[in-house]
Amino acid sequence: MGAAPDGGRAIFISDLHLSDRHPGRSALFYRFLEERAAGTGTLWLLGDFFDYWIGPAHVQLGEHRETLLRLRALADAGTTVKFIWGNRDFQAGSELSKFAGVEVLGESVEATFGAHRTLLIHGDSFCSRDRGHQVFRAVTRNRVVKAIYRALPSGVSLGIAKRLRARSEAGVARKSARTMSFADEAIREAFARGVDTIVCGHCHDAKEVEFDLGGRMGRLYTLGAWEEEAEYLEFDGQEFRRRVFPERAGGKA
Ligand SMILES: [Mn+2]
């Protein structure tokens, strides 16, 4: 076994959309766990980690068995693994803690990294111009709706999840880029909570954007999607750094 994980170091990833449709992406993630996440204090999974998650019954399906076991091994080796809901996997709950040692924190959380008061959130709530998605969000996050969904036989909830995924994919193809993009005012509202840094995913586009908040600066980091490579974020104990996995030729990452 290696040395104890470096508690000051953290890694942030999102939008892996893991499913049995994309075995290559799971393989890339397992490599990432071995080569990058091992030895890190905290691994943050900022939503849409799974392509969909139907609730506690999902652990019985076997689809993510390997992933859950590998997360459990990482957690057992001393890395804290934290999970924020995305718009595809907000049914994740205590079953992830039980089977994979993953702490599920819900919609968002604030945490301090070095000198940075930071909001960790998936980011779909920033698409406030997308009325259709915001209505869908409000309905599916409703406690009663969630409870009814979780009580369904897993064959039924799986069918619903797959239909919703198809609708969501068709919706993405139909909606304009402006409708789906983050609304500036929604991000400014989030900074107004008193944070100076926001880390989120959802847009599948790794960027670093500065916001002049009138007297102070805010910095938004968005995370990339996972395809042949992953653009992720690391906190090295002092500052946030954008990184790429696997490292690009020339060593710059
Ligand atoms: Mn998303």
Image (spheres, helix red, strand yellow):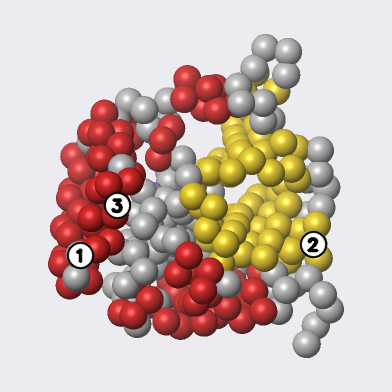
Q: Mark 3 and mark 2: span between their CA atoms?
A: 35 Å
Q: Nearer the viewer, residue 86 or 168?
A: 86
Q: Is residue 67 above or below residue 211?
A: below
Q: Is mark 2 within 8 Å of ligand 1?
A: no
Q: Which mark is residue 146?
A: 3
Residue located at (24% from left, 63% from top): 151
Q: Quadrant of residue 58?
A: bottom left
Assign a secondary structure to mark 3. Answer: helix
Q: Is residue 210 above or below residue 66?
A: above
User: Circle 2 is placed at which residue position?
Assistant: 7
Under mark 3, the amino acid is: Lys
Under mark 2, the amino acid is: Gly
Residue located at (75% from left, 45% from top): 113
Residue located at (71% from left, 79% from top): 77
Q: Position of residue 172 (x, y in %)?
A: 25, 44
Q: Nearer the viewer, residue 170 or 71?
A: 71
Q: Is residue 177 in view from this perspective?
A: no
Q: Position of residue 63 (x, y in %)?
A: 34, 78
Rate crowding at label 3 as few (under 14), some (14 to 19) or many (20 or more) other CA atoms within 10 Å.
Answer: some
Side (left or right) of 169 relative to 221:
left
Residue located at (27% from left, 47% from top): 144
Q: Which mark is residue 107?
A: none
Assign a secondary structure to mark 2. Answer: strand
Which of pointers 3 and 2 indicates the residue nearer the eye? 3
